Image: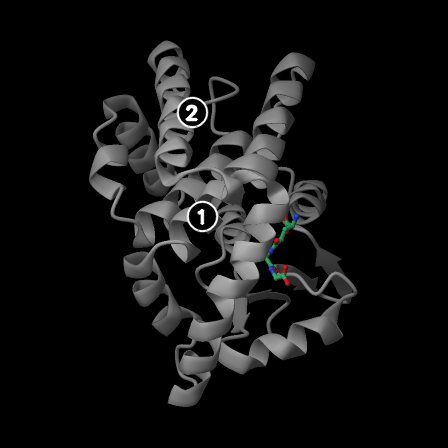
């Protein structure tokens, strides 16, 4: 049995964030997927009923940020968190922005878009009986529409959501034209957290070409994958 098991959904941006961390730190791990109606079992793993969860030897760690900190303590090199306090503060602010704000754009572009949904459901239900794809495909847009409305982004027009998203990319492009990584002269948790959300948007959204038209951002994404192939 492997020492490290990542309980995940393949197309969850937070699970991708953890895979990127594990690979950056060159740790050997296996994944356990909760596709289709296996998702119902996630509530038995933790009270929050969210993934990712990492089983590391006898420890269970929940939440991608807590997993990042845990792995940094156990495997300090290569470091995810800069030692310089200002850079560390910036890295953690970027991480929180990616997890708590950018994430909702990812949800919007995946579940409020017919094309993205049609690409996502087979991935969410891979290796499961066909009727499960029908159930998940019917329920997911309803559940996420409610969540997006409660969060606020779901009350905006699509044009407004896209405008706000691309304004964020304009700002990221400005940062990346001044420095190679978001928070430091080296890759940090900031880059991994932001890239994980953007890569999941790229995976299923028709906005892909517009996103990759940002030269610095496109180069940065390539460098992250290069440093940290998943
Ligand atoms: N703050 C958590 C967020 C995890 C999260 O929201 N995961 C989503 C999948 S992308 C989830 O489990 N959703 C199921 C649900 O909310 O019931 C983290 O960083 O791990």
Residue at which label 1 appears = 108
Q: Residue at x 60, y 17 (%)?
A: 87
Q: Residue at x 43, y 70 (%)?
A: 124
Q: Is residue 111 above or below residue 156?
A: below
User: Which one is earlier in the sequence, the residue at label 2 or at label 1?
Assistant: 1
Q: Residues within 10 Å of mark 2 (few under 14, many from 20)?
A: few
Q: Is residue 130 above or below residue 99?
A: below
160 vs 142, left or right, is: left
Q: Note whether residue 217 is visible.
A: yes
Percent across and percent down for residue 129 are 42, 90
Q: Is residue 172 above or below residue 226?
A: above
Query: Residue 168's mark?
Result: 2
Q: Secondary structure at mark 1?
A: helix
Q: Secondary structure at mark 2?
A: helix
Q: Quadrant of residue 163?
A: top left
- Quick check: is the Cβ at mark 1 less than 8 Å away from ligand 1? no
Percent across and percent down for residue 187 are 47, 29
């Amino acid at each position: 049995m492997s020492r490290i098991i990542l309980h995940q959904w393949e197309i969850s941006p937070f699970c991708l964030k953890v895979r990127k961390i594990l690979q950056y730190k060159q740790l050997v791990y296996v994944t356990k997927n909760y596709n289709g109606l296996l998702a119902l079992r996630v509530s038995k793993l933790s009270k929050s009923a969210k993934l990712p969860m990492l089983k590391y030897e006898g420890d269970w760690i929940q939440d991608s940020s807590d997993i990042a900190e845990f792995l940094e303590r156990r495997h300090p090199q290569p470091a995810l968190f800069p030692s310089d306090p200002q850079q560390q503060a910036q890295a953690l602010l970027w991480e929180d922005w990616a997890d708590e704000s950018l994430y909702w754009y990812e949800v919007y572009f995946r579940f409020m878009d017919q094309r993205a949904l049609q690409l996502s459901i087979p991935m969410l239900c891979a290796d499961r009986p066909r009727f499960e794809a029908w159930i998940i495909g019917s329920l997911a847009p309803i559940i996420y529409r409610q969540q997006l409305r409660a969060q606020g982004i779901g009350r905006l027009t699509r044009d407004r959501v896209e405008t706000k998203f691309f304004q964020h990319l304009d700002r990221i492009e400005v940062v990346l034209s001044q420095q190679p990584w978001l928070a430091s002269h080296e890759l940090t948790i900031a880059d991994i957290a932001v890239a994980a959300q953007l890569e999941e948007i790229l995976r299923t959204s028709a906005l892909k070409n517009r996103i990759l038209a940002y030269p610095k951002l496109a180069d940065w994404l390539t460098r992250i994958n290069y440093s940290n192939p998943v």
